[in-house]
Amino acid sequence: MSDMPQKSTNVVWHSATVTRERRAELNKHQSKVLWFTGLSGAGKSTLAHAVEEELYRRGFRTFVLDGDNVRHGLCADLGFSDRDRVENIRRIGEVSKLFVEAGVLVLTAFISPFRDDRMKVRTLLSSDDFLEIYCKCPLDVCEERDVKGLYKRARAGEIKGFTGISSPYEEPVDPELTIDTSSMTLDDSVQAVLELLLKRGVYSES
Amino acid sequence: MSDMPQKSTNVVWHSATVTRERRAELNKHQSKVLWFTGLSGAGKSTLAHAVEEELYRRGFRTFVLDGDNVRHGLCADLGFSDRDRVENIRRIGEVSKLFVEAGVLVLTAFISPFRDDRMKVRTLLSSDDFLEIYCKCPLDVCEERDVKGLYKRARAGEIKGFTGISSPYEEPVDPELTIDTSSMTLDDSVQAVLELLLKRGVYSES
């Protein structure tokens, strides 16, 4: 049969019929990107995962993108030069866009120290889809926590261009939400994020 | 308050608690990659979207990755040199892996003409997560369809290295499924894919 193309039933071009809107209908929530930004140790990943856990309990479809699952995979070919950092954030932005299209609420947890890079991601998505959440925490608190021992190594000169030590962190000018992780409890921080989602129509209480 | 770190409630490191297993529980299906491969015009995208529509009706979480949403975004920096083609498939593999981790059943529709590249993606994922589906269709049928007018341009020498014309297509040796799109109806093709998913435990009939 394979050499006898007497039937060509597949000729008709089928485009995507499962749209973002239909996914939202199935999921009972909208998809957005929650872009957590802040110093290393400010609690971005902690907060992102805590929000995800709470959203899972409510039956949401979510995904956390962070260094753990991106740096060793999609961006394994990239280093930490200025150029590679820009490309790293660009790819994360593009992947986030695919997840949003797939109906998934994405939570990203990257230092993403430069305003310009974050703005590029905001522009890449529709602006409405990008919710910037600033995990604000004084450098000395982050350094005291030093969960991964990176500050010690940066101070010893073993890590070059380390944000907060030898490379700048540019604070968000007008983020959708600021969480002071040095003073707010994790539970309150999670609640603040949920309120933002509610306010932005990601879900409704009904 | 922000300068007075008297409370540090977020110090505890929270790792991911929403695992792939819990996502599968919520979704009521497993996540895999359905990797459709075949000549341009063989019906990969058509079949992928038709399968997605059928799965949506069953409440599945799915996503189709194809040239439309990848080439202009995540891989916009890549051309069609051998090196760029390899990197293109690598990134698609890595993104597929993230979606699988997120509990989403991914359907990819790329010519992906080289065995070695497809094998790399299979290796990247756990082998069990990669289901290769060969959309088999004679070149002359694909060329007659020429939905996008690419074969005409390739024959005219306007596109270099075009698969089937001026660049080889390496058939899968042992794909999980072969669909002869020149003889099977689209409905039957969709059914064959669903049977594969059932057989591989992606969902159960109950």
Image (cartoon, coloured by chain):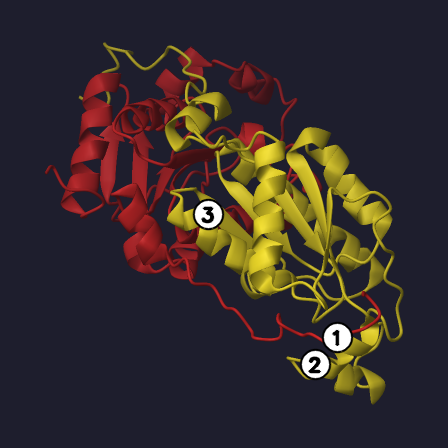
Chain colours: A yellow, B red
| Disc 1 target residue | A142
Q: Which quarter of the figure is the C terminus of chain B placed in? A: top left
Q: Check chain identity for marks 3 and 2: say if they share one.
A: yes
- Give the image location of residue B12, x and y in percent: 56, 75
- Give the image location of residue A156, x and y in percent: 83, 89
State the CA–CA distance, disc 1 to disc 3: 27 Å
State the CA–CA distance, disc 3 to disc 2: 28 Å
Label 1 is placed on what type of residue? Cys
- Give the image location of residue A119, x and y in percent: 80, 41
* B19 vs B133: above or below: below
**Residue for point 89% across, 74% down:** A166
- Give the image location of residue A22, x and y in percent: 43, 22
Q: Check chain identity for marks 2 and 1: say if they share one.
A: yes
Q: Nearer the viewer, residue B69 or B15?
A: B15
* B85 vs B153: above or below: below
Q: Look at the numbered disc 2 and give the secondary structure of its residue.
A: loop
Q: Chain of mark 1?
A: A
- Disc 3 crowd rating (10 Å Cα; few below 14, some 14-19, many 20+) is some
| Disc 3 target residue | A55
Q: Chain of mark 2?
A: A
In the picture, residue A18 is in which quadrant?
top left
Label 2 is placed on what type of residue? Asp
Q: Nearer the viewer, residue B104 or B149?
A: B104
Label 3 is placed on what type of residue? Leu
Q: Nearer the viewer, residue B141 or A161?
A: A161
Is the C-beta separation of discs 2 and 1 under 8 Å? yes
Residue B194 in view: yes
| Disc 2 target residue | A146
